Amino acid sequence: MPDALTEPALRDALATLPEWRLEDDALRRDLRFPDFLAAFSFLGAVAMLAERLGHHPEIHNVYRDVTITLKTHDAGDRVTALDVDLATAIDRHLARRDP
């Protein structure tokens, strides 16, 4: 079972993830895409990243808006290194697709 991050470790992690925020003991990021197809394409990429890491996010999608929530159920619904790893992978994916 993964351990929840300590407060200092969580602060350090958030410093490396400027687009993410801590909300309700979870990492959360809101994204807006040009249209539904772009949002859905991104969600497909997130699915592949999540499968590779064996850690799956909560995803909310309405048209072109996507909210990703990361927390680890096995750690009492708190943030673990798995969540930070997936957030980092998502950010890297987004950086590669930006012009």
Image (spheres, rainbow, N blue to C red):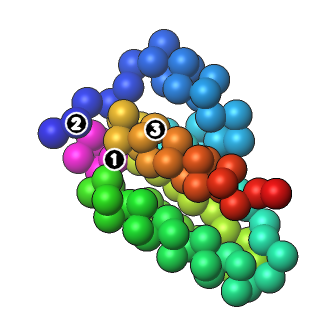
Q: CA distance from mark 2 to mark 1?
A: 8 Å
Between 23 and 44, the one nearer to me in the picture? 44
Please name the residue shown 44% across and 48% down the image: 86
Q: Earlier in the sequence, mark 1 or mark 3?
A: 1
Secondary structure of the residue carrying numbered label 3: helix
Please name the residue shown 52% across and 42% down the image: 88
Q: Type of residue at label 3? A: Val
Q: Mark 1 — residue?
A: 72
Occupied quadrant, residue 61: bottom right
Q: Earlier in the sequence, mark 3 or mark 2?
A: 2
Q: CA distance from mark 3 to mark 2?
A: 12 Å
Horizontal and vertical percent for residue 93? 59, 55
Q: Type of residue at label 1? A: Thr
Give the foreground label among 1 and 3.
Answer: 3
Occupied quadrant, residue 42: bottom right
Q: Mark 3 — residue?
A: 84
State which region is magenta.
72-78
In this rendering, the answer to whether 32 lies above or below 86 is below
Q: CA distance from mark 1 to mark 3?
A: 10 Å
Horizontal and vertical percent for residue 22? 59, 37
Query: Do labels 2 and 1 touch, CB within 8 Å?
Result: yes
Does residue 25 appear in this view? yes
Between 3 and 32, the one nearer to me in the picture? 32
Between 50 and 1, the one nearer to me in the picture? 50
Secondary structure of the residue carrying numbered label 1: loop
Between 28 and 53, the one nearer to me in the picture? 53
Q: Type of residue at label 2? A: Pro
Horizontal and vertical percent for residue 56? 37, 61
Along the horizontal axis of the image, is 44 left or right of 95? Answer: left
Q: Mark 2 — residue?
A: 2
